[in-house]
Amino acid sequence: MKPIDELVRRAIIGDGAAFTELWDTNIESLRAYLAGTVMKQYDTFHIDDICSRSFEKAFRQIRSYDPSRSKFSTWLRAIARNTALDTIEAEERSSRKFVSIDDGDTRVAVIDNMGDGESTPLDSIIKDEDEEKLGRYIAALPELYREVASKRLIEGLQYKEIADETGLALNTVRTRIRRAKALIDNMKADDENDWER
């Protein structure tokens, strides 16, 4: 059995370390693939974001991977290509929803609600409950995002501080935190839907 097949086998049975190793083994070639194909006009931040989303999808769908049909890297590239195209299309749709506030090219989103900055005892109780919930959400994240999410959302560290502490590139930190926040938002939405039923 090839080393990559062994990593896939371990990832299928839930070994997070094996999946992290799959990330380490494939991330550079996946970045190069995206930069040379569907994301030629995008910067490294956007490319890293697509890589993170693609690995997240691969992690969730790993049981559907069939090594007899394709190499893992080929399967991962297909996921990345589809993710990139979907994201580009969604961003184009989203950018059409913004309105110009001057006659130039500046586009802004309107902030509907801003707090007055005052804190009440009830706010403190809600904050404590929210932090406890946030800790549970972070614990449920894939291993890839857990550490940076905790450092940013619980400890309140800046991106550069996280990069320095973890030895990760700054863009990688930004991308992982962005994906972690999106995953946490999804978990919150699922909880709210369950509560409404």
Image: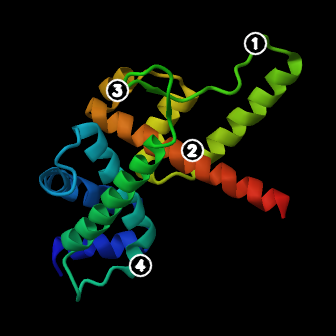
Q: Is residue 117 above or below residue 167?
A: above
Look at the numbered discs 1 and 2 and tell me whether their residues touch, using CB distance below 8 Å: no
Residue 37 numbered tag: none
What's under tag 3, amino acid-wise?
Answer: Glu
Residue at 65 percent of width and 39 percent of height: 134
State which quadrant residue 148 falls in: top left
* Residue 117, visible in the rendered structure: yes
State which quadrant residue 43 falls in: top left
Between discs 3 and 1, the one toward the N terminus: 1
Between tags 3 and 2, which lies in front? 2
What's under tag 2, amino acid-wise?
Answer: Ile
Residue 49 picture location, percent across and down: 34, 46
Residue at 33 percent of width and 32 percent of height: 166
What's under tag 1, amino acid-wise?
Answer: Asp
Between tags 3 and 4, which lies in front? 4
Q: CA distance from mark 1 to mark 2?
A: 29 Å
Look at the numbered discs 4 and 1 and tell me whether their residues touch, using CB distance below 8 Å: no
Q: Quadrant of the C terminus?
A: bottom right
Mark 1, secondary structure of its residue: loop
Residue 165 numbered tag: 3
Residue at label 2?
138
Residue 168 picture location, percent across and down: 28, 35
Residue at label 1?
116
